Amino acid sequence: MNSAFDDTTIAFVTDTIVAEGGSGTGIDFDACILYYLIVGSGIGGCFFLVGITGNAFTLAIMSKERKKSSTINSLFMLAIADSCVLISYSYLIPVGIRKYVGGWFSGHNFNHIAFVYVKEAARVFNQVSAFITMLVTFQRYVSVCLPHRAKQLCSVSLVNKLTAASFLFSAIFYLPQFLYYTLEKNEFGRYYSVSRSFVANQVFQVIYSAILTLLISYVIPVSTLIFMCIRILRVMHQQGKLFQQSDERSRTRRDLTISSIAIVILFVVCQSFTYATRVLMWIYNPFYKYSRCGGVLQTYSFVPHIALMFNSAANFVIYICFAKAFRKKLFGIFCKSSKVAPMKESIEGRIFSVTTA
């Protein structure tokens, strides 16, 4: 199979071709429009608003002190990457609305450009988010499991360098996916995709699209995060620090560790839909035929993208649920109170819930 055809891009094109073939196709386009409206515009729109708002508050809270703490700096960078993911996926919001108001072909060319190119930008930023999530978890791993190496492995400058490297590597690695297709217009003035010659190359498909992409986007991040989280939980359990009562400074460290583990769990669940799509591609071949409007996987087609939006939007909620100091700081933004956190707390304790790492 051709693993380049792994998303709704070709599904969208195929819908156009089928629709232009006449009204005897037996496809209920009204149901497809309703699906785009509810899932893309409704659910996607809610995740976008909540995520952008939450990340904005996160950036405001952490911006002043991020240069003094590597962990705060990592979380700051994660909020930026997550915001970029949400902005990239914001093209899903008008799709359903325009189709509902103007019909199936309303905004076709805009939608098509977004599905072919903007979606790939979201893939780049999601990869950056994955790398930074690994970086945040690694700092908690060092702080809990290797505290004697914290000063060596956890620094603001190192976080900045690794974040820049993550952006650069992700952009270069996913560059071929921006070049998969060229856009041409049919007799109706509507865009359709024409795949480039290298897309059909079996060696390229096996090595890049099947093996490397799966390793970089899912296997390596997920396996690494799971390993570090298990090690962190084991060490904390052995030290008896997971649930015991302790001083304020120890509680702030524990809060950040629990928050980091919650972020990892959410990441693994949401990213698993991308892996599930790869499996479905082998079961339902050609995948675009089954994921298009009227296909058996049509209702699944947006799920991986919505899951990634949810992943990028939910970290703010995790901070609120598990980080007491973050809640205090957030409350202080609304109340304009100068008594948000004790003056003697560490920088990280005032902002989030962490000490040195």
Image (spheres, rainbow, N blue to C red):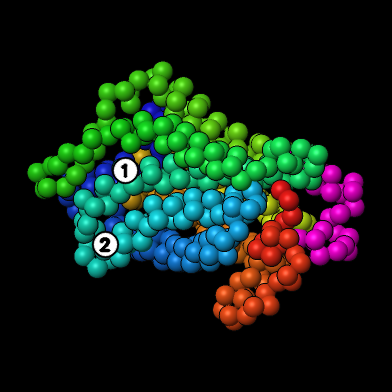
Label 1 packing within 10 angstroms: few (<14), some (14-19), many (20+): some
- Is 218 within the magenta? no
Nearest to the observer: residue 320 or residue 112: 320
Q: Position of residue 36 (x, y in %)?
A: 36, 59
Q: Earlier in the sequence, mark 2 or mark 1?
A: 2
* Residue at 49% from the left image edge and 40% from the top image edge: 164
Q: Please say whether residue 268 is visible from this viewpoint.
A: no
Main SS, magenta region, reads: helix
Q: Is residue 62 above or below residue 124?
A: below
Please tell me whether mark 1 sits on a helix, a strand or a loop: helix
> Residue 330 shows which numbered tag?
none
* Residue at 30% from the left image edge and 32% from the top image edge: 179
Report the Cα–Cα distance between label 2 and label 1: 20 Å
Nearest to the observer: residue 83 or residue 77: 77
Which stretch did the figure color magenta? 228-252
Residue of label 1:
117
Residue of label 2:
99
> In the displayed structure, does residue 330 sit left or right of residue 105?
right
Q: Amino acid at mark 1?
A: Tyr
Please tell me whether mark 2 sits on a helix, a strand or a loop: helix
* Residue at 67% from the left image edge and 74% from the top image edge: 340
Q: Is residue 52 above or below residue 137?
A: below
Q: Amino acid at mark 2?
A: Lys
Q: Position of residue 150 (x, y in %)?
A: 74, 41
> In the displayed structure, does residue 279 sit left or right of residue 92?
right
Q: Please say whether residue 176 is visible from this viewpoint.
A: yes
